[in-house]
Structures are given as C-alpha cells and as structure tokens.
Image: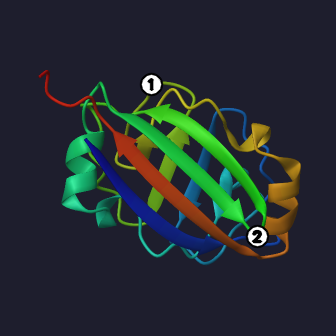
Amino acid sequence: MEAQEIIRCRGHPLVLGTHPTTFEVTCEEHLTENGNCIVGVAADRGCAGLSQEFRSLLCHDDAMLTTRLASGEITAEIHAKGSDRLTLSHPTDMVWRRSTFTCSRTIGICSDAVAATLPRELIARLRQGDELIVTLTVTRPGPAS
C-alpha cells in the first residue's frame, strides 16, 4: 500500500539548516534565526492538510516515509518512520525528527537526516529563496497473500 503527497514551498534568506535533531517545513511566511530547523516556508499545507488516505497509511508503526526534497537539480532523499502515535493535526507545520518524539507537528520519526545533515548545496539554494518541492511517499506492507 502506498500514497503520495507533493508540498510546494520556498526557501528564505534565514534558512540556516543547522538543527541537529529535526527539520521542518511550515506554512508561515517569515523566519527568524531561531528557526534553524526550518528549510521551507510558505508551504501550501501543514500536517492537517494531508489527504485522509495518506494520513491513514502513515499513522501505523510499520509505515515508512520517504521524503524527497528538490530545489532545481539539487535533491535529497530522507527516510523516516510513521507511528500509531502521530496525530498529524497541526495546521501549518511538518517536522521530521531523529528521535521517536511525536506531537501534532510530527510527520516522521527516526529520520535518517536532519537540517544539519542536508546537502549544503540545497541549503544554499533555499537561502536564495528558491522553490522547494517536498514529495512525500508513505508505504506499508500489504496484506499477506
């Protein structure tokens, strides 16, 4: 079983990409230097805006989330896990976490990448305000045959 969502957002001059445990995309338009986990602003939706099909697949402990961040020709692929503890109820934010902590903003846990480990070429493009396309693909094992 699989579902996919595409989120459109953009970078900002204050994208730092230095947070050691998370990265985030937000619908908010503005960013301060304190938001060192935020890599995309002005997203077209937050967790609460994901389709019901996507949400129902991701909210299981056996779900796997593949995230592709693309700005021009620069891309990064991140792997994280879903969880039955996800609520996906935040209206503006999506946060990927290295840990297993969940809250209304969490979209993935046990992420194999965080802001500080994203390609510096990607962060440089985002600091220029370039468009960021976030492709989310959730997969779960199908029923046994």
When the figure is inspected, residue 100 is found, relative to residue 59, above or below; the finding is above
Q: Position of residue 112 (x, y in %)?
A: 62, 29
**Seen in the image, is 141 located left or right of residue 42?**
left
Seen from this angle, which residue lies furthest top? 144
**Crowd class of label 1 (few under 14; some 14 to 19; many from 20; radius 10 Å):** some
Chain-order first, disc 1 or disc 2: 2
Instruction: Say which of marks 1 and 2 sits in front.
Output: 2
Secondary structure of the residue carrying numbered label 2: loop
> Can you tell which mark lies on residue 48?
none
Instruction: Answer above or below: position of 125 versus 69.
Output: below
Residue at 42% x, 49% y: name it.
Answer: 137
Residue at 72% x, 33% y is 20
Is 16 on the left or on the right of 30, as rendered? right
Residue holding disc 2: 72
Task: Tell which of 122 and 26 is nearer to you.
Answer: 122
Tell me: 15 left or right of 4: right
Q: Name the amino acid type tagged 1.
A: Thr
- Mark 1–mark 2 Cα distance, whole angstroms, equals 31 Å
Q: Report x, y in % for residue 44.
A: 46, 76
Query: Looking at the image, is 128 positioned above or below residue 110?
Result: below
Q: Secondary structure at mark 1?
A: loop
Report the label total: 2
139 or 17: which is nearer to us? 139
Q: Amino acid at mark 2?
A: Gly
**Residue in the picture at 54% in, 48% down:** 67
110 to the left or right of 47: right
Please give the label number shown on residue 100: 1
| Residue 50, picture quadrant | bottom left
